[in-house]
């Protein structure tokens, strides 16, 4: 079973990498694809260029073969709608292969506002990464979806291709790309918040210098 984890990765940091590995290990994924988005739909646009974000991602995961950088949203260009990305994976993997999409709890809470949320849920299982004891789904529409689709045993994810929701508690690291960019722009060091090799690339390209 493979998983998909999309994000801006502007730049990738230990918050992303640790939760990625948490999910890989817990669900026993064969592979997790990390997909940098081209143009954001719901948020401000990335600062670093697509090829810089991709290069930083590649260097961050080069020695962890289960994590694979996937540039299909960057090569497709335009707004990165999840539903389009999932269609492209379904063309590749067929309709029967179980497929998991990792989403942060905050993003999940806004699922109703995503482009074609029901189509998304027909194409993948949703793995909602959350804090221990966090509330699930305040939105009534989403609460209904959770009631219909939630499973407790991750082994069930392999019984069907898509359509289930699983909540996973992941390591809490208070790291954001915003803070890393701010530190760099202020001439301070974000070391130990992200891999040294990523930091070296950010310095060399000066992509976050003020
Ligand atoms: P920014 O600060 O620029 O908004 P970010 O650090 O949140 O960026 P993104 O690339 O936007 O990083 O995040 C991609 C995904 O990773 C999102 O689903 C987000 O919830 C998750 N994520 C980001 N940081 C962490 C973290 N420290 N712990 C767990 N998940 C994280």
Image (spheres, grey):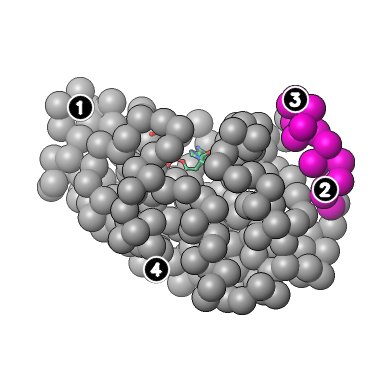
Eye-nearest disc, 4 or 3: 3
Q: Secondary structure at mark 4?
A: loop
Q: Secondary structure at mark 1?
A: helix
Q: Position of residue 68 (x, y in %)?
A: 44, 66
Q: For the residues labelled 3 and 2, say whether their Cβ atoms are less than 8 Å apart.
A: no
Query: Residue at label 1?
Result: 185
SS at badge 3: loop
* Mark 3 within 8 Å of ligand 1, using the beta carbon: no
Asked if the residue under mark 3 is in contact with the one under mark 4, i.e. CB atoms within 8 Å, the reply is: no
Q: CA distance from mark 4 to mark 3?
A: 39 Å
Measure the C-alpha gap from mark 3 to mark 2.
15 Å
Q: Which residue is mark 2?
A: 150
Q: CA distance from mark 3 to mark 1?
A: 37 Å
Queried whether the magenta region covers residue 82, the answer comes back as no
Q: Quadrant location of residue 60? A: bottom left
Q: Is residue 203 left or right of residue 149?
A: left
Residue where numbered disc 4 is placed: 63
Mark 1 CB lies closer than 8 A to ligand 1? no
The boundaries of the magenta stretch are 136-151
Depth check: 113 or 12 in front? 113
Mark 3 or mark 2: which comes first in sequence?
A: 3
Labelled pair 4, 1 in contact (Cβ < 8 Å): no
Q: Is residue 133 in view from this perspective?
A: no
> Residue at the spot x=27%, y=27% of the render?
183
Residue shown at 33% from the left, 48% from the top: 78
Q: Is residue 100 left or right of residue 150?
A: left
Residue 53 is situated, as x and y percent measured from the top left of the image, at 29, 50
**Camera sees residue 164:** yes
Q: Which residue is mark 3?
A: 138
């Amino acid at each position: 079973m493979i998983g998909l984890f999309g994000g801006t990765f502007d730049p990738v940091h230990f918050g992303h990498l640790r939760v990625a590995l948490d999910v890989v290990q817990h669900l026993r994924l064969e592979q997790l694809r990390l997909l940098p988005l081209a143009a954001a739909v719901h948020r401000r646009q990335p600062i670093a260029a697509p090829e810089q974000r991709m290069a930083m991602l590649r260097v961050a995961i080069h020695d962890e073969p289960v994590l694979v950088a996937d540039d299909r949203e960057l090569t497709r260009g335009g707004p990165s709608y999840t539903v389009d990305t999932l269609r492209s994976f379904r063309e590749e993997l067929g309709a029967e292969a179980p497929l998991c999409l990792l989403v942060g709890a905050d993003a999940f809470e806004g699922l109703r506002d995503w482009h074609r949320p029901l189509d998304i849920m027909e194409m993948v299982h949703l793995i909602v990464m959350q804090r221990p004891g966090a509330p699930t789904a305040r939105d009534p529409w989403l609460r209904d979806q959770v009631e219909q689709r939630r499973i407790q045993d991750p082994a069930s994810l392999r019984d069907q291709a898509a359509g289930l929701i699983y909540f996973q508690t992941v390591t809490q690291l208070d790291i954001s790309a915003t803070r890393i960019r701010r530190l760099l722009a202020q001439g301070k060091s974000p070391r130990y918040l992200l891999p040294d090799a990523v930091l070296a690339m950010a310095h060399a390209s000066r992509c976050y210098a003020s």
